[in-house]
Amino acid sequence: MIRRGIMFFDVDSQGWRIWIGQQEYETFTGMTFEIRIQHRYYEACFEKDYNEWFVTLEDDVAFTLRMVEVY
């Protein structure tokens, strides 16, 4: 079952969190998950390099997460 959620930066813990329904989850470096972009699902990996957090899609494309955005 695919569920929708949001990902946001938690200033108190200095880490990214994922909310699905009423449940909050921690993220960690190397964590894999699926992300949907325009009706297509991609294998994604959550990563950190120094102080910069980013997501890599299918070992090919990476995008940097901005702490002021909600994804």
Image: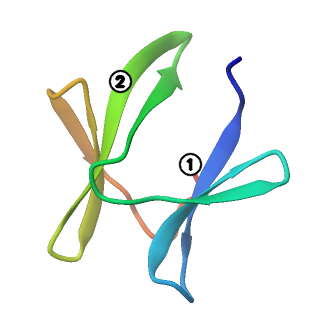
Q: Name the outermost residue toward the top.
A: 39
Residue at horizontal 51 percent and vertical 84 percent from the top: 13
Q: Quadrant of residue 1?
A: top right
Q: Quadrant of residue 55?
A: top left
Classed neighbour count for the residue bearing mark 2: other residues with Cα under 10 Å, few (<14), some (14–19), many (≥20): few
Position in image of residue 56 (x %, y %): 25, 38
Q: Quadrant of residue 21?
A: top right
Amino acid, disc 2: Glu
Position of 24 with respect to 48 (left or right) is right
Position of 29 with respect to 2 (left or right) is left
Q: Which residue is mark 1?
A: 71
Between circles 1 and 2, the one closer to the viewer is 2
Position in image of residue 33 (x %, y %): 44, 34
Classed neighbour count for the residue bearing mark 1: other residues with Cα under 10 Å, few (<14), some (14–19), many (≥20): few
Query: Which badge, 1 or 2, is on the more N-terminal residue?
Result: 2
Position in image of residue 46 (x %, y %): 33, 49
* Mark carried by residue 60: none
Q: CA distance from mark 1 to mark 2?
A: 16 Å
Position in image of residue 19 (x %, y %): 70, 53
Amino acid, disc 1: Tyr
Q: Which residue is mark 2?
A: 43
Q: Name the outermost residue toward the bottom.
A: 12
Rendered view: 62 above or below 22: above
Q: Secondary structure at mark 1?
A: loop
Residue at horizontal 24 percent and vertical 23 percent from the top: 58
